[in-house]
Amino acid sequence: MTDPAHPWTQPASVVRLDIPGGREVAHRDVAANGARFHIAEVGDGPLVLLLHGFPQFWWTWRHQLGALADAGFRAVAMDLRGVGGSDRTPRGYDPANLALDVTGVIRSLGEPDAALVGHDLGGYLAWTAAAMRPKLVRRLAVSSMPHPRRWRNAMLSDVRQSTASSYIWGFQRPWLPERQLLAEDAELVGKLIRDWSGASLPDDEAVEAYRRAMLIPSTAHCSIEPYRWMVRSMARPDGIQFNRRMKRPVRVPTLHLHGSLDPVLRTRSAAGSGEYVEAPYRWRLFDGLGHFPHEEDPAAFSTELVNWLQDPEPDR
């Protein structure tokens, strides 16, 4: 139910935002994989599909959308299942299904393929989609997220990584994490973003936007469900099968971006993901940046991304 005292609980009034520079953004909904997904679109050219992480929504890519459009790309940022303006379904938050959401959106946009750009959970799904549906992924760019097999190994064998990602273990409790996320108008969302950032924090306007988006009914629960699956499935047949499927190498050019001060996913955990890539692989470490390099230094991030996308023969 929508609370009339809080108009931001209506998704459209919260997530259909503008981007810097006064550029017009086309907001619309597309159907894919049995659900409806909100997208924000700018520009024309080869498709670049951007996937956000936790605790954010499509607007985290507001700086990159304009930069990509200026560089001659069709830049589209989507809200993942259960977040922003997309459907909040009761099930379907395992990474294999979420990756099918992504590839389904590519098809719904009428494109033969896309360059996928993912941050955090969006990066996990980008890795997954590139392995599962390689014909639909032209290139892959991942920020602040190791390859899923690398992530799993680090969580199970590296005490420092397990400690750094303690919030994920906390998500395994029923109901309490949702209540904590929503308390005091989603104050915890702002705290997490500030704690996970380097010295160049996202601005207050951005933090407020993410807090409002988390208050949309059911968003907190849906945002947590992928992390519950990632942990609870480790010893289950479905999780073991997914881990085996991810042995399939990524065979598209891959750009891997990471902040040197990321307190959530250690550089040591992310580095080495190239062993799962049988194609040109480029590692870029941003000194002094934390978990959100695309927002902490959007100019440097966008330049690196655009130059790599425009490079006809990216080297290793």
Image: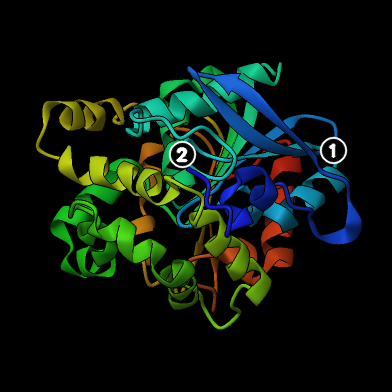
Residue 93 location (% of width, % of height): 35, 34
Q: Nearer the viewer, residue 26 or 112?
A: 26
Residue for badge 2: 82
Query: Which residue is more in the foreground, 227 or 276?
Result: 227
Camera sees residue 237 = yes
Residue 274 x/y as whole percent: 41, 45
Q: Nearer the viewer, residue 12 or 210?
A: 12
In the rendered view, tell whether residue 304 sits above or below residue 2: below
- Amino acid type indicated by mark 1: Gly
How crowded is the residue under tag 2: few (<14 C-alpha within 10 Å), some, or many (20+)?
many
- The residue that appears at 82% across and 43% down in the rendered structure is 25
Reply above or below: 174 against 187.
above
- Residue holding disc 1: 43
Mark yes or no: residue 307 visible: no
Name which residue type carries label 2: Gly
Q: Under tag 2, what secondary structure?
A: loop
Element at label 1: loop
Q: Please name whichever residue, 95 or 91, is drawn nearer the observer in this view of the structure.
A: 91
Specify the quadrant of the image occupied by residue 90: top left
Q: Name the image quarter holding residue 299.
A: bottom right
- Number of the front mark, 2 or 1: 2
Of all residues shown, which one is farthest toward the front?
A: 4
| Label 2 vs 1, first from the N-terminus | 1
Residue 226: mark: none
| CA separation in Å, label 2 and label 1 | 26 Å
Residue occupying the point 53% across, 64% down: 211
- State left or right for residue 249 relative to residue 137: left
